[in-house]
């Protein structure tokens, strides 16, 4: 059974069709990429999957649960986490707090226990803090735990976003342009990092990316979007030679 | 000659600041001093009125400072920590003040007022919290300027509703309260309120509140139930505004709707932004400085209202986040939180040592 199943997902912004009849089956453990020119509706698909937008039509099922109509925090608690195209860390909070916040849905104390610092508060805070520090250590960020997130260099901020997403204990990780703004050497590292994260945390990964080297290098399957519609789907080699894809990216060939 | 002289002075100055800094650090390291100081303060709050250690006027100012600390801290929760912009805090205060006063004057049997006073104050707080629940709902949909307008309207509604209920005196106000607010009560409620709000801030829910300020959408996507967090923040904030209202009413022994208008809300806003957003120490400082400064400047008459805004203008120009903006006095941070990463590191190196010993 697929982990994620999208059927006929369509979304309109007013009269503009941003996503049209989008279908996707994600098997557990897969690494799938979505590519397409700017404005093709890639990020909108992520927003539909995570509940930021509510799909106009269609259904998205995760592990047998319907996601359309659920709020983002409910969907995250079910096991889908994401990063953002432009970094959206909690800038004025410490690196440790950034990761601890992502434990919200899994902390076991009530507001009353929080107000009085009684009951399960102490033990839970310790558990959350230790888990967060362990996670930061695995991602080699533990040395920065007490720094403000905004003071980290760009590459580490990207990594912290992944750490924060992993803290929600996801089964599916959505990466929105993880290599945006990186140089070729950094892209190589990012590819290694994505592979390693998938294995280490036993994840299914869906990613959006413009860097063809990254997409072609690590994705097992690629979907190509243009103007909201899926124009091609297949293994990287197939996509590279697909005339429709070339047309979408480079324009139609002039027949002389 | 003059050169060496100035160098001597600079040396002296450097040595002095270094000594002061070291002394301050040594003082901060003694966390056990805080409960001692609080216990001492509590005893003092009994002793001062009992033995007349301070004159009545100064005692009154101290009580206003306490009430204003509760107001500023509770507003900071919503405006500073959560990053919303509520401008109707006096509305909640009015609800608490009227409920507590009606209880002690009309409901409780005569003579029991002093005993049932805490019940009246808590009831005032609960009433305000209930109203806070209603105001939290628009905050799910609107933020920033729009929420400011909603809370502004709320403040006006509270004022005109009270003005139009003849049974509680309408625009003439409500009186007949005994002077039940005493220095020990104010001390107790101030410490209690600040402690509860501090606890909230250093919890999972408090971090949720902070994450809403930083980026609400990211917060929601990191599994924070933003609606729940907003409800908790608004309800806690308005509860303590109501508590402050109850104390205020039984200190002044007279309340009228005009005392809780937008001007009062603005006063509380000034204390919050003067002291610093997102800081409990800041709210305590802001409330204390503002209250005391207004009293000290009283001889200036009308010029006071020119000077105070000027102070604010300069503050916003040079320290836009207030005196303590986003920083906290170390004693207010729970010990575990302060040392979290260090404790983790120590535990890990110990674990590693154990492992090498075992092998």
Image (cartoon, rainbow, N blue to C red):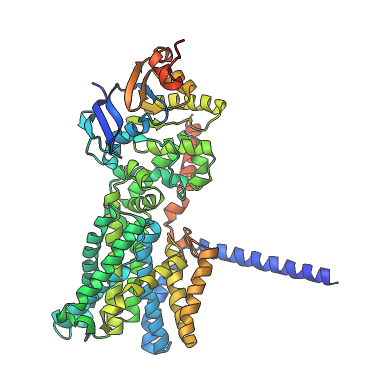
Q: Kindly give the residue lying farthest to the top in the view shown.
A: A256
Q: Quadrant of the N terminus of chain B?
A: bottom right
Q: Which of these two is toward me, A159 or B201?
A: A159
Is residue A127 something one can see in this rendering? no
Residue B167's image quarter? bottom left
Left/right of residue A7 with respect to residue B149 in the rendered view: left
Write the residue at 27% across / 50% down: B227
Residue A161's image quarter? top left
Q: Kindly give the residue lying farthest to the front in the view shown.
A: A256
B317 w.r.t. A152: above or below: below
Residue A91 lies, in percent from the top left, at 46, 47
Write the residue at 82% across / 69% down: B4
Is residue A75 something one can see in this rendering? yes
B182 w.r.t. A66: above or below: below
Q: Which of these two is toward me, A128 or B7?
A: B7
A255 w.r.t. B255: above or below: above
**How many marks on residues?**
0
Residue B297 lies, in percent from the top left, at 49, 83
Left/right of residue A126 with respect to residue B253 in the rendered view: right
A211 w.r.t. B107: above or below: above
Left/right of residue A63 with respect to residue A184 in the rendered view: left
Write the residue at 42% across / 89% down: B55
Residue B17 lies, in percent from the top left, at 65, 66
Residue B285 lies, in percent from the top left, at 46, 70
């Amino acid at each position: 059974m697929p982990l994620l199943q999208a059927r006929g997902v369509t979304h309109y912004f007013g009269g503009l069709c941003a996503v049209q009849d989008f279908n996707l089956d994600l098997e557990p453990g897969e690494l799938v990429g979505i590519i397409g020119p700017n404005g093709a509706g890639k990020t909108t698909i992520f927003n539909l999957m995570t509940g930021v937008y509510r799909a106009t039509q269609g259904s998205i099922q995760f592990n047998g649960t319907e996601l359309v109509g659920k709020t983002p925090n409910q969907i995250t608690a079910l096991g889908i986490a994401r990063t953002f195209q432009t970094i959206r860390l909690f800038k004025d909070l410490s690196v440790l707090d950034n990761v601890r916040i992502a434990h919200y849905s899994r902390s076991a104390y009530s507001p009353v226990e929080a107000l009085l610092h009684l009951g399960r508060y102490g033990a839970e805070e310790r558990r959350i803090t230790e888990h967060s520090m362990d996670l930061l250590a695995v991602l080699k960020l533990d040395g920065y735990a007490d720094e403000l997130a905004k003071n980290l260099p760009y590459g580490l901020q990207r990594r912290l976003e992944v750490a924060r997403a992993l803290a929600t204990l996801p089964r599916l990780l959505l990466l929105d342009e993880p290599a945006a703004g990186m140089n070729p050497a950094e892209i190589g590292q990012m590819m290694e990092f994505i592979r390693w994260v998938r294995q280490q945390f036993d994840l299914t990964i869906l990613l959006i990316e413009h860097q063809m080297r990254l997409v072609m290098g690590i994705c097992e399957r690629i979907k190509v979007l243009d103007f909201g519609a899926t124009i091609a789907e297949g293994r990287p080699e197939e996509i590279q030679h697909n005339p429709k894809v070339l047309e979408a990216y480079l324009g139609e060939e002039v027949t002389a | 000659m003059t050169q060496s002289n100035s160098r001597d002075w600079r040396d002296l100055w450097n040595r002095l600041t270094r000594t002061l800094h070291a002394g301050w650090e040594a003082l901060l390291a003694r966390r056990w001093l805080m409960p001692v100081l609080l216990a001492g303060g509590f005893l003092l709050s009994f002793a001062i009125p009992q033995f007349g250690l301070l004159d009545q006027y100064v005692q009154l100012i101290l009580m206003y400072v306490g009430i204003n600390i509760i107001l500023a801290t509770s507003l900071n929760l919503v405006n500073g920590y959560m990053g919303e912009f509520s401008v109707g805090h006096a509305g909640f205060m009015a609800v608490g003040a009227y409920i507590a006063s009606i209880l002690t004057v009309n409901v409780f049997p005569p003579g029991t007022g002093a005993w049932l006073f805490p019940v009246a104050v808590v009831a005032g707080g609960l009433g305000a919290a209930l109203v806070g629940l209603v105001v939290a709902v628009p905050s799910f949909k609107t933020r920033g300027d729009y929420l400011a307008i909603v809370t502004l309207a709320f403040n006006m509604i509270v004022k005109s509703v009270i003005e139009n209920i003849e049974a509680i005196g309408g625009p003439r106000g409500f009186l007949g309260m005994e002077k039940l607010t005493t220095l020990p009560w104010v001390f107790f409620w101030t410490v209690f309120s600040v402690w509860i709000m501090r606890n909230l801030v250093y919890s999972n829910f408090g971090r949720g509140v902070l994450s809403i300020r930083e980026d609400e959408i990211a917060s929601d996507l990191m599994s924070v139930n933003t609606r729940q967090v907003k409800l908790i923040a608004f309800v806690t904030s308005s509860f303590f505004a109501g508590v402050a209202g109850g104390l205020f009413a039984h200190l002044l022994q007279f309340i009228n709707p005009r005392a809780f208008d937008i001007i009062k809300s603005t006063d509380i806003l000034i204390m919050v932004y003067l002291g610093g957003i997102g800081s409990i120490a800041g709210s305590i400082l802001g409330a204390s400085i503002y209250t005391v400064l207004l009293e000290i400047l009283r001889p200036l008459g009308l010029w006071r209202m020119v000077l105070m805004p000027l102070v604010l203008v300069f503050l916003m120009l040079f320290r836009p986040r207030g005196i303590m903006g986003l920083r906290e006095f170390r004693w207010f941070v729970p010990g575990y939180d302060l040392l979290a990463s260090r404790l983790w590191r120590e535990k890990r190196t110990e674990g590693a040592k154990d492992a090498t010993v075992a092998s």
